[in-house]
Amino acid sequence: MEESLTTDTQTEVAPKKKISKLSLLKPREEMTAGDYARNYTLEFLAVFFWIYTLAKVFIFDVDLWIVGNFLPEYAWVLSFKLIFILALASAMWLWVGTRDVIVWFLYITFYPFVLLLIRLPFFVFKQQSWILAFATFNAIATFFKNLKYSLIFTTVFLAAFAIAIFFPAGVPLLLAIGVLVSLVLLTYVKSFLTALKPTVIFQIYSKLFRGARSLGHSSFALDAEIRDLPIEQLEPKQLEKWNTSLQSSVLFNRFCLFTSTKLRDYQKSEWRMIPSIFGLLWLVTFTVISFSGIYYALFKWQDELFRFTEEPSYFTFLYFSFNNFVLNSTAELAPATMLSQSTYMLQASLSFILVAIIATLFISHRTQKSTSELDEVITAVEEEARSMEGFIQTEYKIPNIESAIDRLKEVQSGLVQLIYWFSKGIR
C-alpha cells in the first residue's frame, strides 16, 4: 500500500516535458549554433524556392539550361528531380522535426508576405526613421487596398500566360494572346486614371484620425455628474476618472500634432517619389514579360510569323521583347508578317508612351498632386489637434494644453512620459 502511494506521489510530481521554442522566435541571447544553422538554412531555401519558381515560370527552364551548358553528362538527373526534392524534404523533416517542418513549409510558401509584413516593418523599426516608416506604411496599405483587384488580375494573367507558354497549339493560344494584350492595355489605362485620381492612401489618414476622435469620445469626455464640479470637490474615484480622461485627450492632441509634423517631414523628403519609381519599374517588367508570352504564343500558332537564325526558345522571345521595349533590334529574331509586325509596333508604342508621357505624368504630376493632397491631410490632422485642445479647455476648464500636461505630471500619470516624447517631436 505504501509503495502504491509512493508511486502515485512520484507520478503526480513528475515534471512536465518542456516544449522548446522555435528557432525563428528565439531572442538573440538564447540562440545556439544549431538555431543559427536552421534559420539560415530556412532563409536560403525560401529565397531559392521563389527565385527558382519565378525564373521557371516567367523566364526559362533554369535547371535545363544549367545542366545543358555546364553538366550535360548529368542530364539524366533531371528525370529524377521529384525524387531528389522528396529526399531533401525528408532530410529536413528528420533534422528539424514534425512541428518545425510544418512551420518551415508555411514560411517558405508565404515568404513574400513574411518579407512584406514582418521583415520590412522590423527593418524600418530598426532604422528609427519616421520618413521611412510612412513610406513603408503607404506601400503596404496601398497593396492591401488593391488586394482584391490584384488577386483577380494576377490569377487571370497567370492563367493566360501559362496557356501561352505551355499550350502546344490551337485556338487557346489565340485566346491567351487576346487576354494578355487586354491586360497590358488595362494596366496602362489604370495607371493614367490612378495618376489623375486622388491618392487613396492620403485619404485614409484623414479618415483614421476623424474616426479615432469619434470612437474615443467616451474616453475623452467627462461624465455629466463631474463635468461642472470643481476639481477640489471630486471624490478619489471621480478624480481618477478626471485624470484618466484628461490624459487620453492630451495624448490624442499630442499624437495628432506629432503625426502632422512627421507627415510634413515626409512631404519634404525624396521618399515620396519611391512609389512612382516602383510603379514605372512594374510597368516595364509587366510589359516585357507579357509581350514575351504573346510573341511565343504567336510563334507556336504560326512559326512563319517570325524570321529567326535558329530555333527560338521562350528565352529568345523574352530577350526579343526586352530589346523591342528599349527600341533595339535583335539579329536572332524579327517579325516577318503583318500580324507579328503589328504586335511589335504596339509594344514599341507602349514604350514610347511610357517614356514620353507616363514618366512626366506619373512622377512629376503625381508628385505635385501628392504634395497638395498631403497638405490637406496635414491640415486635417492639425485641425483635429486644435479641436481636441479646445475640447480640453472647455471640458476640463484648463486654459491651455501646457497646463494640462503640467497637471498630468503633478498626478504622475502613467502615460505622461509618452506625452512628453510626442511633444518633443512636434514643431
Image (cartoon, grey):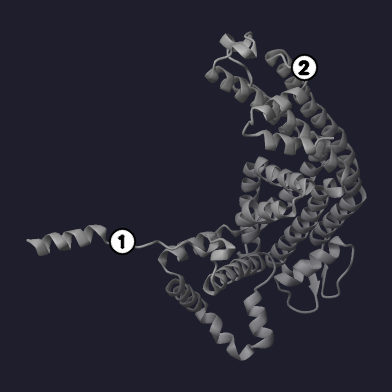
Depth check, front residue: 407 or 421: 407
Please indicate, yes or no, whether residue 196 appears anywhere in the rendered image: yes
For residue 31, which quarter of the picture? bottom right
Give the labeled residue for mark 2. 399
Q: In this rendering, is residue 173 above or below 331?
A: above
In what quadrant of the picture does the N terminus appear? bottom left
How far across and how far down the image is residue 140, in percent? 69, 46
- Residue at 87%, 33% in the rendered image: 372
Tell me which residue sits at (82%, 50%) in the image.
Answer: 274
Density class for disc 2 (Cα within 10 Å; few <14, some 14-19, many ≥20) is few
Residue 23 x/y as whole percent: 52, 65
Badge 1 is on which residue?
15
- In depth, the one of 16 and 146 nearer the eye is 16
Mark 2–mark 1 CB contact (< 8 Å): no
Q: Nearer the viewer, mark 2 or mark 1?
A: 2
Q: CA distance from mark 2 to mark 1?
A: 62 Å
Q: From the viewer's perspective, is 216 left or right of 101? A: right
Q: Amino acid at mark 2?
A: Pro
Task: Report the disc number at residue 52.
Answer: none
Q: Quadrant of residue 299?
A: bottom right
- Residue 379 vs 160, above or below: the answer is above
User: In the depicted view, which residue is nearer to us: 55 or 29?
Assistant: 29
What residue is at 90 percent from the left and 38 percent from the top? Answer: 368
Q: Is residue 211 visible in the rendered structure shown here?
A: no
Q: Label 1 is placed on what type of residue? A: Pro
Mark 1 burial class by Cα count in 10 Å: few <14, some 14-19, many 20+: few
